[in-house]
């Protein structure tokens, strides 16, 4: 179960064969890059046909482990063309013909990975939620009407800190 001290170790043991197969069939032949952190995996592929290899490896892994990729939770981030209705329809037709089980995958020019948006069209997306949370906390701290020293400490630890993760990564 999530939160169990063994869950991280068990995930690493279970997912290592999948990552090894990605390394062998995607990374080493220079078809793309694979990024993994905990249970989140991202793939940056050079060609659409490499998506078929990724799907085949994922299906073999599902059969061996019982761990299933959920295409509805996945995002195909287009980096060289706009995710227009026409381009999305083209990709969906390709998926229908080549990887039908992935046809409902989200398609966009940006998607979230490890809490941050990635892709060529992120604009200010990475700052929207942290800025909103920062403003909300600043208003809450001001509403307390605490002495300046206390309010300053609260502002530093509870308001400014919410911008830190996005600032470090971005």
Image (cartoon, rainbow, N blue to C red):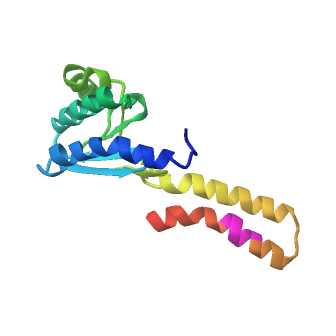
Residue visible at 17% across and 38% down?
A: 50
| Horizontal and vertical percent position of residue 133 | 65, 55
Residue nearest the observer in this picture, 51 or 13: 13
Residue 77: where, in percent of width, then height? Answer: 32, 42
Snapshot quadrant of residue 89:
top left
In the rendered structure, which segment of residues is drawn in magenta?
A: 154-159
Measured as percent of width and height from the top left, residue 109 is found at: 35, 43
- In the picture as drawn, the residue positioned furthest to the bottom comes out as 149
In what quadrant of the picture does the C terminus appear?
bottom left
Q: Is residue 151 left or right of residue 59?
A: right
Give the residue drawn at x 35%, y 50%. Answer: 36
The residue located at (58%, 45%) in the rendering is 3
Q: Does residue 155 show up magenta in the picture?
A: yes
Question: Is 51 covered by the magenta stretch?
Answer: no
- Residue 133 appears anywhere in the view: yes
> Which residue, as the protein is rendered here, is positioned at the far left?
29
Identity of the residue drawn at 28% across and 46% down:
19
Q: Position of residue 165 (x, y in %)?
A: 53, 63
Q: Horizontally, is 13 left or right of 4 in the view?
A: left
Placement of 134 over or under 64, stated as above or below:
below
Q: Is residue 111 visible?
A: no
In-front residue for pair 94/40: 40
Most prominent secondary structure in the magenta stretch?
Answer: helix
In which image quadrant can residue 4 be found?
top right
Looking at the image, the residue that sits furthest to the front is 6
């Amino acid at each position: 179960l999530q939160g169990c001290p063994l869950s991280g170790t068990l995930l690493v043991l279970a997912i290592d064969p999948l990552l090894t197969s990605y390394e062998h069939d995607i990374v080493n032949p220079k078809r793309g890059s694979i990024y993994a952190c905990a249970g989140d995996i991202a793939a940056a592929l050079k060609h659409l046909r490499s998506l078929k290899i990724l799907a085949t490896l994922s299906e073999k892994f599902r059969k061996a482990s019982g761990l299933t990729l959920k295409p509805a939770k996945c995002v195909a981030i287009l980096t060289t063309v706009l995710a227009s209705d026409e381009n999305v329809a083209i990709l969906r037709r390709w998926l229908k013909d080549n990887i039908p089980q992935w046809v409902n995958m989200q398609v966009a020019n940006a998607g979230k990975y490890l809490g941050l948006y990635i892709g060529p069209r992120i604009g200010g997306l990475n700052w929207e939620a942290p800025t909103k949370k920062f403003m909300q906390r600043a208003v809450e701290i001001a509403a307390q009407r605490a002495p300046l020293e206390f309010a300053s400490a609260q502002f530093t630890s509870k308001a400014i800190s919410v911008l830190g993760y996005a600032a470090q990564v971005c």
